[in-house]
Amino acid sequence: MKKDNKTIGITIRFFTNNLPNKVGKNKDKTPFWTCGNAHLEANKTKGIKPQNEIFNYFDDIPRAVNKVMRKAKLVAVEDMAYSFNVKEKTKNSNKIESINRKGIKIFGTTKGKKYNASLVNLKEVELNGKIFNSPSGAARFICGYPVDGWNFWKVVVGGKTKEIDCLRKK
């Protein structure tokens, strides 16, 4: 794709330092580390400054991309549409009490301590600035053991506290 002022470019770069140039039986493969850098390119028309974030393994790439986008204060249209969709679906008695710019405000309690987070796109959880790919991943992080995040995290809907599992399409 041609680089222009109508696009936002993100480049994923993998580190290759301290590795041989070629490997494999026929010396025809180029090795790389599974860590690297997510780079958001500048776009003067949109007022976007370049941003960088290191990732440590393949599964960490979405977090790094999300981080550079947040640093640049970018918001995906899908995120905005999702928020509007949730507000529309929950207008009446099933109203979700708290939707913010990041997503739906949720909370969980373990060992007597309450943790506040945001559910983004009904799949990711943002907890203290850290993005988790699932509610269970975030719950495990704070509990220290495997937890069903869909039952651990709570949301206030229609004045009642419910497990976030109630938000999933059944």
Image (tube, helix red, strand yellow):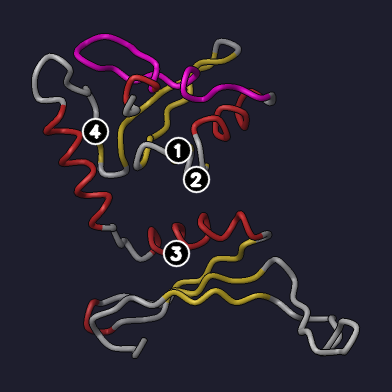
Mark 1 residue type: Val
Q: Are marks 2 and 1 in contact (CB under 8 Å)?
A: yes
Quarter of the image for the N terminus: give it: bottom left
Mark 4 lies on a secondary structure that is strand
| Residue sitting nearer the eye, 43 or 77 | 77
Cα separation between marks 2 and 3: 12 Å
Q: How busy is the neighbourhood of tag 4: few (under 14 within 10 Å), some, or many (20 plus)? A: some
Asked if the magenta segment contains residue 72, the reply would be no
Mark 4 residue type: Ile
Cα separation between marks 1 and 3: 17 Å
Q: Earlier in the sequence, mark 1 or mark 4?
A: 4
Question: Going 86% across and 84% down the picture, which residue do you hit?
Answer: 23
Where is mark 3, residue-wise?
68
Quarter of the image for the C terminus: give it: top left
Q: Is residue 44 above or below residue 149?
A: below
Image spot of residue 163 (x, y percent): 39, 16
Image spot of residue 14 (x, y percent): 65, 75
Image spot of residue 67 (x, y percent): 46, 58
Q: How busy is the neighbourhood of tag 1: few (under 14 within 10 Å), some, or many (20 plus)? A: many
Where is mark 4, residue-wise?
99
Where is mark 2, residue-wise?
131
Q: Earlier in the sequence, mark 4 or mark 2?
A: 4
Q: Are marks 2 and 3 in contact (CB under 8 Å)?
A: no
Cα separation between marks 4 and 2: 17 Å
Question: Going 31% across and 75% down the picture, which residue do you hit?
Answer: 48
Res 26 quadrant in image? bottom right
Over which residues does the magenta segment extend? 146-164
User: As drawn, which residue projects farthest toward the left?
Assistant: 92
Mark 2 lies on a secondary structure that is strand
Mark 1 lies on a secondary structure that is strand
